Amino acid sequence: MIVSDKKRLLVIGAGGHAKVVIATAQAAGWEVVGLFDDDSALKGTTVLGAPVIGGTELATNLEVDGAVVAIGGSRARMQLSEKLALPWATISHPSAEIHHTVVLGEGAVVFAGAVIQPDSTIGRHAIVNTAASVDHDCVVGDFAHLAPGTHLAGSVNVGEGALLGIGASVIPGMKIGKWSIVGAGAAVTNDVPGGVTAVGVPSKVTEWRS
Ligand SMILES: CC(C)(COP(=O)(O)OP(=O)(O)OC[C@H]1O[C@@H](n2cnc3c(N)ncnc32)[C@H](O)[C@@H]1OP(=O)(O)O)[C@@H](O)C(=O)NCCC(=O)NCCS
């Protein structure tokens, strides 16, 4: 019998985002032993060779070294991370450049080609997606999601749960409020309040949500 010495990871969520999380984890040396998803139609399927075992209520039955919530939506990621008592892993693709002073929260995932510069902090279960860049002294809140190709200049503060859409850019020192959405391709040149959607170049608030 061949026994793997790789660390064993389980993955919550089996959609498209999970595919990239699994690719990242495998590149980082994890063995993905199973996925859990509440969509019963996915049970018995595989994602990059890893089996979808069943609903998320079963996830705590498996003995693993780490777990990750692989769902792009920030609120669902928060809810599942709070519901499930699992040993949350922090995963970085080997091609990501992360300065040694950077603090990554538990459950955070950093995808291929991302760059995170000195003294920045990435919150719990936050996502720094493919080729995103985070310059010096940024604070990225818990459950926030920097979509592929997002660029944060220095000293930017991204609030809890905020989503910066693909290719969004933020000039130095700006604050993005909690649970706000910055549209794809936006250029943020003023603070964005919490709970809004802001789009465009320069970005303007187009929606206030409760
Ligand atoms: C901003 C966003 C959230 C708006 O989504 P929505 O509420 O469904 O908005 P709609 O698609 O109904 O568009 C509403 C209006 O905003 C405009 N709009 C939408 N997204 C825009 C953007 N990124 N920049 C500029 N204008 C945008 C639309 O053209 C439309 O304009 P109109 O009313 O003049 O026709 C979405 O378009 C977006 O950019 N999401 C980012 C997705 C992403 O990058 N995810 C990461 C995956 S890893």
Image: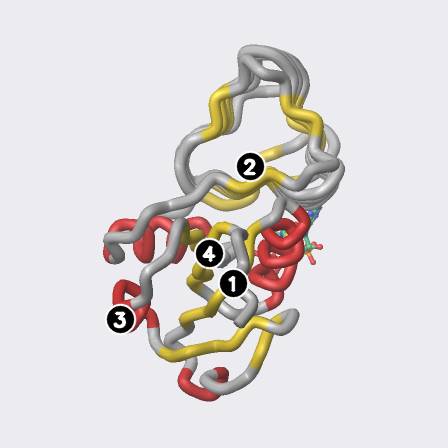
Label annotation for residue 9: 4
Left-right relation of 101 to 53? right
Q: Is residue 40 above or below residue 10?
A: below
Q: Is residue 36 above or below residue 180?
A: below
Q: Secondary structure at mark 1?
A: loop
Distance from label 1 to label 4 (Cα)? 15 Å
Q: How is the image coloured?
A: secondary structure
Res 177 visible: no
Residue type indicated by callout 3: Glu
Circle 3 or circle 1, nearest the eye = 1
Q: Which residue is mark 2?
A: 205
Distance from label 3 to label 1 (Cα)? 28 Å
Residue 72 at what x, y percent from top left?
53, 55
> Mark 4 or 2 closer to N-term?
4
Residue type indicated by callout 1: Val
Q: Residue at x 32, y 66 (%)?
A: 62
Q: Secondary structure at mark 3?
A: helix
Q: Which residue is mark 3?
A: 57
Tell me, yes or no, whether the two marked residues, 2 and 3, touch with CB atoms within 8 Å: no
Residue type indicated by callout 2: Val
Q: Which residue is mark 1?
A: 3
Q: Secondary structure at mark 4?
A: strand
> Mark 3 or 1 closer to N-term?
1
Q: Secondary structure at mark 2?
A: strand
Q: Is residue 154 above or below residue 26?
A: above
